[in-house]
Image (cartoon, helix red, strand yellow):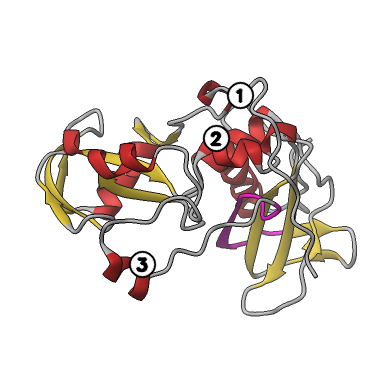
Amino acid sequence: MLPVAAPRPMTGYSRAKFPHWAIQHGTCDTRETVLARAGQDVKQDAKCRAVSGHWHSPYDNLTLTSASQVDIDHLVPLANAWRSGADQWTTATRKAFANDLNQPQLLAVSAASNRAKGDQSPDQWMPKNHDYCHHRPPRLPPMNELPQLASQVTAGPGGVMTDEVGVITGDLTVTTTTRPDGRADITVEYTGAEERYVMTGSPSPMPAGGLSDLHATVLDRVRVGQAATAPG
């Protein structure tokens, strides 16, 4: 039987310990990125702010016509993550978690429903829209499933150096995964294959820009090739 640990204390908790919303590209932060991908007919200004569009809030089945009516909800509330073990993470790991665009962690919902939910866990609060709960049960990311990014890229001349098999070349899938200690593991595999190899030099320190910045740097190195290694 899987042991269930007691919730950890809220001692020291602050939303500021989960830095958000981080810049994802250009001037677009995580909130604006989620608004753009979740909405319909979304138009953004020169600063990447959503100035028009409409959004469906799955929690209460409402259609929202202004970005000011939309909150970006963490399916696993930050305070709930803290009680579940994120108090022991580094700030870089908490930042990656709070801005994770890959796991089904961030939803565009009505501000009213988000504030009704607060920091309650799924056993404490469920949406008013029971059809959402029945037909689209959210997959909550386990606390031990750390944020990661994966991209397909073609290696430049000279390929990528790995610990296990030396240089590999061609069409590769590169995965950058946050570690609990705040660094990141970097692996590469032939696209479509299942065996991953550790990129020589991994794990890498997490830069100030977080997981997305590190992943972008790794991809740039792979495109250049020349027996590329992980950032040190």
Q: Left or right of 31: which side holds 22?
A: right
Mark closest to the chain's N terminus, 3 or 1: 1
On screen, residue 94 above or below 134:
above
Residue at the spot 32% in from the left edge and 40% down from the top edge? 116
Label 1, secondary structure: give it.
Answer: loop
Mark-to-mark CA distance, 2 and 1? 7 Å
Residue 213 visible somewhere in the drawing: no
Q: Amino acid at mark 1?
A: Tyr
CB under 8 Å between callouts 3 and 1?
no
Residue at the spot 66% in from the left edge and 43% down from the top edge? 84
Where residue 99 appears, as percent x and y from the top left, is 49, 40
Residue wearing tag 3: 133
Residue at the spot 22% in from the left edge and 55% down from the top edge? 60
Q: Which residues are magenta?
A: 144-158
CB under 8 Å between callouts 2 and 1?
yes
Where residue 86 appears, as percent x and y from the top left, is 67, 38
Q: Amino acid at mark 2?
A: Ala
Residue wearing tag 2: 79
Residue wearing tag 1: 13
Q: Amino acid at mark 3?
A: Cys
